[in-house]
Image (cartoon, grey):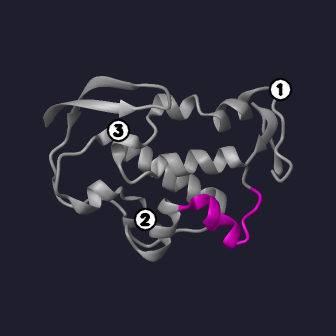
Amino acid sequence: YVEEEATRFTESTPRQKRRRLLLPQGVVGKLPYMSPETYRNAEPFDGFAIDMWTTGTTLFFLLSGAKYEQPFDPIFEAMTRDLAGLLPHWGIAYLSPQCIDMMQRLMTIDPRHRLTLEEALSHPWLRDVASPQHQEHPQAQQRQISDNSTSGWLVV
């Protein structure tokens, strides 16, 4: 591994932290879930940022029912550039703006600008879904969740 001083840019201020970067070890993983930096296999990469990319693609696949075949194919390009414009073009109007924002920020090509785990957990989409005072977006669909241990509503 390599250590580097990394600057994360948040909406308010940049913050410094040390991080360990993994050395490229060949292209590994399933192409539809593979982060751009893994696919390129050229520079040391942040393993946590790769996990957040995969979280974003998994969320995208689950909520949209769509997927791309490999990094940098036409769907990938459209998805990473303008997800908010792409989804309505596909007839997907049931996702809230907060949901789309979270997916877009998880699937940011530059890993330095991708959401961290802490940022994702405090993102309005997750925070609002967990809130009992949640106000529904007019186009959002509610799906009731119930099993033996939990019950509630999920707004996507």
Look at label 1 and name its amino acid. Answer: Gln
Residue 83 painted magenta? yes
Q: Are marks 3 and 1 in contact (CB under 8 Å)?
A: no
The label number, if any, that marks residue 48 in the structure image: 3
Look at label 3 and name its amino acid. Answer: Phe
State the CA–CA distance, disc 3 to disc 2.
18 Å
Frontmost of labels 1 and 2 is 1
**At numbered mark 3, what does the secondary structure look like: helix, strand or loop?**
helix
Look at label 2 and name its amino acid. Answer: Pro
Quarter of the image for residue 109 reads bottom left
Quarter of the image where the N terminus is located? top left
Q: Residue drawn 58% across and 44% down?
A: 102
Residue in the foreground of this view, choosing between 58 and 49: 49
Q: Which residue is mark 1?
A: 133
Q: Which residue lies most toward the bottom here?
A: 74
Q: Earlier in the sequence, mark 3 or mark 1?
A: 3
Q: Which residue is mark 2?
A: 32
Quarter of the image for residue 152 reads top right
Q: Are marks 1 and 2 in contact (CB under 8 Å)?
A: no
Q: Residue drawn 38% across and 70% down?
A: 72
Q: Are marks 3 and 2 in contact (CB under 8 Å)?
A: no
Q: Which residue lies most toward the right here?
A: 138
**At numbered mark 2, what does the secondary structure look like: helix, strand or loop?**
helix
Q: Earlier in the sequence, mark 1 or mark 2?
A: 2
Residue 43 is situated, as x and y percent measured from the top left of the image, at 17, 51
Q: Label 2: few (<14), some or many (≥20) within 10 Å?
A: some
Residue 142 is situated, as x and y percent measured from the top left of the image, at 83, 48
State the CA–CA distance, disc 1 to disc 2.
36 Å
Q: Earlier in the sequence, mark 3 or mark 2?
A: 2
Q: Residue drawn 81% across and 51% down?
A: 140
